[in-house]
Image: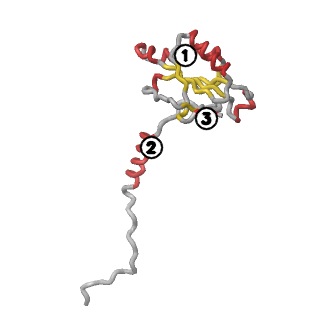
Amino acid sequence: MSKFNKKKSGDLPAISTASLPDIVFMLLFFFMVATVMRDTTLKVKNDLPFANQVEKLDKKDLIMYIYAGKPSERFQSTFGKEARIQLNDKFADVSDIQAFIEAERASKREELVPFLTTALKVDKEVNMGIVSDIKTELRKVNALKINYTTRNGDISQNE
């Protein structure tokens, strides 16, 4: 009569899955907190020019973006290859800029309206005519605070 029994052939015990739901929910909460939703989907080509004196803006929620550039490849069959303006997620004409600015001003609190900045994200291949048209429309609505968005780099890379 032996007091000690031999172990049976080394079978491993079943892995406990009790903590699996905790791990899944922890990952879910992490991705929910860490994910940033994209505001707008770019429908125009937006290869920004380089500049060497770049300044970063502080409050991004006080910026209204106006994109200008050639439509991306999937929209070229519909909208052609000429440079277009994009306001939020839609293609727009120059005449739509005033309504866009008024709508953006209406969506902000009244005390923040004087601090709104219009950022022009213009592709480097766009003609200056469309930029001057945009600026003319902005002047009509008295949106005089304009920012040109660029990439930080050497100017010689723009060619």
Quarter of the image where one finds residue 108: top left
Judge the density around disc 1: few (<14), some (14-19), many (≥20) Cα neighbours within 10 Å: many
45 or 33, nearer to the observer: 45
- The amino acid at mark 3 is Ser
Instruction: Of the two numbered discs 1 and 3 on the same chain, state the one appearing first in sequence.
Output: 1
Residue 86's tag is none
Q: Residue, x 37% and y 51% (percent of image)?
A: 22
Foreground mark, 3 or 2, reads 3
Give the number of callouts. Answer: 3
Q: Quadrant of the N terminus?
A: bottom left
Task: Give the distance between the C-alpha atoms of the residues marked 1 and 2, in whole angstroms.
Answer: 34 Å
Which residue carries the number 1 mark?
A: 101
Which residue: 40% across, 14% down? Answer: 111
Residue identified by numbered label 2: 31
Q: Which residue is drawn at the image coordinates 63% and 29% (left, top)?
A: 123
On the image, the x and y values in percent for residue 110 come to 42, 13
Residue annotated with mark 3: 156
**Foreground mark, 1 or 2?**
1
Query: In the figure, is residue 134 to the left or right of 6?
Result: right
| Side (left or right) of 69 relative to 52 | right
Q: Position of residue 139 (x, y in %)?
A: 57, 11
Residue under the point 45% across and 14% down: 114
Foreground pick, 68 / 101:
68
Q: Judging from the image, what secondary structure is the residue with disc 2 in?
A: helix
Secondary structure under tag 1 reads helix
Crowding around mark 2 (Cα neighbors within 10 Å: few <14, some 14 to 19, many 20+) is few
- Marks 1/2 in contact by CB < 8 Å: the verdict is no
- Lower sequence index among marks 3 and 2: 2
At which x and y percent is residue 68? 63, 25
The amino acid marked with disc number 2 is Phe
